[in-house]
Amino acid sequence: MKVIVVALALVALAAAGPVPDAVPEPIKILRSEFDVHPEGGYNYAFDTENGIHRDENGEIKEALDEENKPHNVVVVRGSYSYTNELGEPETITYWADETGFHAEGSSIPKVPETVARR
């Protein structure tokens, strides 16, 4: 009987603790810009109150497909930064074009040179 009373007391104590907010406050956007150019390019950027920052731009470029036929592609270049779980600043830079998506940053593993040369 004593075990049941102790168990119920522990459950009541846990239930009486502070209740976390069900919905956290949304993070405010301090700056947001989006510009579309007539030829198809664009500029995009935003900053948030928790230190997230992103800049990106896209421009139209003519590239050749597998059959050597020209076509337009959007070349994207940008970066974003934030504070990681350890409280350290992280910045990732990236670009994407007809060769694919490429990203660099201290948290992104590097491809060993011997693999990259193959």
Image (cartoon, rainbow, N blue to C red):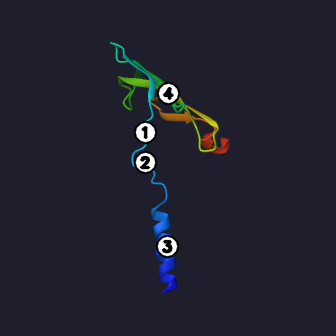
Instruction: Answer with the quarter of the image where residue 84 lies.
Output: top right
Q: Which residue is mark 1?
A: 25
Q: Nearer the N terminus, badge 4 or badge 2? A: 2
Q: Which amino acid, mark 1? A: Glu
- Residue 116 in the image, given as x and y percentages of width and height: 61, 40
Label 1: how many Cα within 10 Å (few below 14, some 14–19, many 20+): few
Q: Residue at x 45, y 54 (%)?
A: 19
- Image depth: mark 1 or mark 3 in front: 3
Q: Nearer the N terminus, badge 4 or badge 3? A: 3
Q: Which residue is mark 4?
A: 54
| Residue positioned most to the bottom | 1
Front-most of residues 39 and 32: 32
Q: Which amino acid, mark 3? A: Ala
- Image depth: mark 4 or mark 2 in front: 2
Q: Which amino acid, mark 4? A: Arg
- Residue 69 in the image, given as x and y percentages of width and height: 35, 25
Of helix, strand and loop, which one carries label 1?
loop
Of helix, strand and loop, which one carries label 3?
helix
Q: Which residue is mark 3?
A: 9
- Residue 57 in the image, given as x and y percentages of width and height: 45, 21
- Residue 91 in the image, given as x and y percentages of width and height: 59, 32
Question: Mark 2–mark 1 contact, CB under 8 Å?
Answer: yes
Question: Mark 4–mark 1 contact, CB under 8 Å?
Answer: no
| Residue positioned most to the top | 38
Vertical relation: 82 (above or below) 37 = below
Q: Which residue is mark 2?
A: 21
| Residue positioned most to the left | 38
Alpha carbons under labels 4 and 2: distance apart: 29 Å
Front-most of residues 29 and 92: 29
